[in-house]
Amino acid sequence: MTTHRVLAPSPPIAGETVKGPASYFPSIEKTYGRPVQEWLDIAADGLDTQSHMAVVQALKEEHGLGHGHANAIVAYVKAELA
């Protein structure tokens, strides 16, 4: 388990519009069948030693994510860790 865990955002309140990378999260969960928290943990671990684009590439190659979804996950984690 990571020591720098980035928590997934809470679900939006009815009528609230989510913007930025987190707006992809419902689609990511539906498309890949895993909670977004798992993807955030994978990205956070990867960012310990790799660049943004290297982690995006790993999510695409090793886990089958599309580029937009992978980039949204990594961008969210980077913003939360900053």
Image: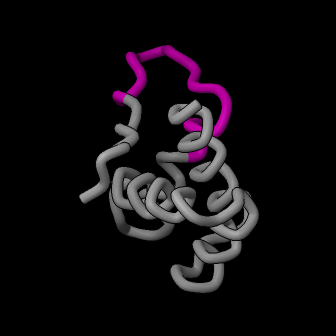
- Is 14 in the magenta? yes
Quarter occupied by residue 65: bottom right
Q: Residue at the location (59% across, 37% down)?
A: 23
Residues drawn in magenta: 10-24
Q: Nearer the viewer, residue 23 or 38?
A: 38
Quarter occupied by residue 49: bottom right
Task: Specify the principal SS of the magenta part.
Answer: loop
- Residue 20 x %, y %: 67, 31
Point out the image quarter for the N terminus.
bottom left
Q: Residue at the location (55% across, 84% down)?
A: 62
Q: Nearer the viewer, residue 46 or 32?
A: 46
Q: In the rendered image of this protein, does residue 63 appear above or below residue 55?
A: below
Q: Residue at the location (58% across, 40% down)?
A: 76
| Residue 34 shown left or right of residue 15 in the figure | left
- Residue 2 x %, y %: 31, 54
Q: Nearer the viewer, residue 5 or 24?
A: 5
- Is 58 in the magenta? no
- Residue 42 x %, y %: 44, 63
Quarter occupied by residue 52: bottom right
Point out the image quarter for the C terminus.
top right
- Residue 41 x %, y %: 39, 56
Q: In the rendered image of this protein, does residue 9 appear above or below residue 66?
A: above
